[in-house]
Amino acid sequence: GEGGREMVLSIRRWALALSAALAATSVEAFAPAGVLPLRRHSAACRSGSALSTVMMVKAKAGSAAKLQVLLKEAVEGVGKANEVITVNTGYYNNFLRPKKLAEIISNDQVVVKDEKEADAREEIKQEAITMGTVIEELGPVVLKRKTGKNNNIFGTITHKQIADVIKDKSGGKVTFNQKMKWTVPDVQGLGDFTCSVQLHPEVLQEVKVSVQAEK
């Protein structure tokens, strides 16, 4: 009768619900490691569409977000001052930023930084070229020396002696520093010779020297 049909329908509905629950459980049980199932239901949980399961992959364990930063000071094992490096977000937030050792820098800021540094390097090079031109215009460096047998000079000719003469002749316009390496031959007698000074990594300037007898 009617009561029997209602019981049969109730049993079928219960069986369908149980089947769906078991299917969902099996998906979770056999999902690969690192993968989570995401169930999508209709707005009212019943819209005629079947239950669908979408697998979502977790982010790999241990992968950390990275930040591009500019070091304000040298950090041992990390980088030099004014160097752009990439570090873990946690390292920046927990160590570099609190100690004011670095700041975040964008790609556009890196481009601007590189352009400024390139301009500064070119300016230094041009200053060295100008210095070399002044040295040439001053003419030969004349050094007076006492002589002995066969016009051999007493003492040695050093780059400092040559540099001092150039500085005096230029009125202080030309000055040298310790980074500028000189190459001076071993001069033992009177005469002319040429030495050189590295004014810049890309600028090598020759200097003419005349060693004359002191009267």
Image (tube, rainbow, N blue to C red):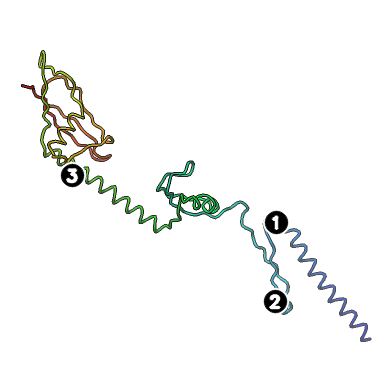
Where is residue 59? Give x, y as percent. Answer: 61, 57
Category of crowding for the residue at label 1, using alpha-carbon neighbours closer than 10 angstroms: few (below 14), some (14–19), many (at least 20): few
Residue with the mark numbered 2: 42
Where is residue 208? Give x, y as percent. Answer: 14, 31
Task: Answer with the quarter of the image where residue 11 lies.
Answer: bottom right
Category of crowding for the residue at label 3, using alpha-carbon neighbours closer than 10 angstroms: few (below 14), some (14–19), many (at least 20): few
Does residue 118 sit above or below 49 in this rendering? Answer: above
Relative to residue 183, is residue 12 drawn left or right? right
Q: Secondary structure at mark 3?
A: helix
Q: Residue at x 67, y 63 (%)?
A: 55
Q: Earlier in the sequence, mark 3 or mark 1?
A: 1
Q: Amino acid at mark 1?
A: Pro
Category of crowding for the residue at label 2, using alpha-carbon neighbours closer than 10 angstroms: few (below 14), some (14–19), many (at least 20): few
Q: Tell me how far mark 3 sits from mark 2, CA to CA.
A: 80 Å
Mark in the foreground, 3 or 2: 3
Residue 130 is labelled as 3
Q: Tell me how far mark 2 sits from mark 1, CA to CA.
A: 26 Å
Q: Amino acid at mark 2?
A: Ser
Q: Amino acid at mark 3?
A: Thr
Q: Residue at x 33, y 54 (%)?
A: 115
Residue 32 is labelled as 1
Relative to residue 162, is residue 55 drawn left or right? right
